[in-house]
């Protein structure tokens, strides 16, 4: 939620509506990309697999962005805030990571004799992405618990 004290001259409700609208459009776009990637006939190329992974990461980012508008300022329950923030942070990192992977695959596919290594590259990259999506929020949450219990 956008605090109204930050911008006293701006109508905050309009900003919230714009944020919800763009997040919903991004969510729909991510779902459409997933549907199109899944409709590609089997054997899917490595680029299509990375585009699907990017669409899933963007889906989670849009979902967390929509959730952020329903958080209440000054709420005593920080669990939802931590879950939303962790999903947003992880999915943003994954979006950048999978975009870099798409660029790397595009470069490797132009080189001769690199096609056989692309499937191994996909498995390694997605494994790193899934582990970061699961491990980063956990580390962040336990760090928060440790800091709050120490002070």
Image: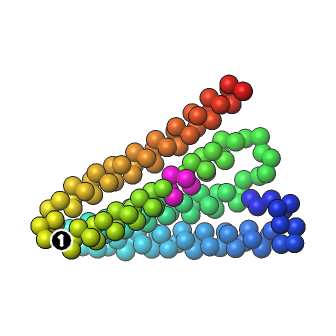
For the record, the magenta segment spans 88-92
Secondary structure beneath dot 1 equals: loop
Q: Looking at the picture, how far across and down is residue 38, in whole percent?
A: 33, 69
Specify whether residue 17 is painted magenta: no
Residue 37, by quadrant, is bottom left
Q: Residues within 10 Å of mark 1 (few under 14, many from 20)?
A: few
Give the image location of residue 133, x and y in percent: 45, 48
Residue 148 position in % (x across, y down): 69, 31
Residue at image coords 70%, 42%: 78
In this rendering, is residue 111 above or below 96? below
The answer to whether residue 52 is left or right of residue 88 is: left
Scheme by which the image is coloured: rainbow
* Residue 109 horizontal/vertical position (percent): 21, 71
Which residue shows up at 60% across the image and 70% down it? 24
Q: Is residue 90 magenta?
A: yes
Judging by the rendered image, the residue that carries numbered circle 1 is: 111
Check the image and report above or below for 75 versus 122: above
Residue lying at the far top of the rendered structure? 150
């Amino acid at each position: 939620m956008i605090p109204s004290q930050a911008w006293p001259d701006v109508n905050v409700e309009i900003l919230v509506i714009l944020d919800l609208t763009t997040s919903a459009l991004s969510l729909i776009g991510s779902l459409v990309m997933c549907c199109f990637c899944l409709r590609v006939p089997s054997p899917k190329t490595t680029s299509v697999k990375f585009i699907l992974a990017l669409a899933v990461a963007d889906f989670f980012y849009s979902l967390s962005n929509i959730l952020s508008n329903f958080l209440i300022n000054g709420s005593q329950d920080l669990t939802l805030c931590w879950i939303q923030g962790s999903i947003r942070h992880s999915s943003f990192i994954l979006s950048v990571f999978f975009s870099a992977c798409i660029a790397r695959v595009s470069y490797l596919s132009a080189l001769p004799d690199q096609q056989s290594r692309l499937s191994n590259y996909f498995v390694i990259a997605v494994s790193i992405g899934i582990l970061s999506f699961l491990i980063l929020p956990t580390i962040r949450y336990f760090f928060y618990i440790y800091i709050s219990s120490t002070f």
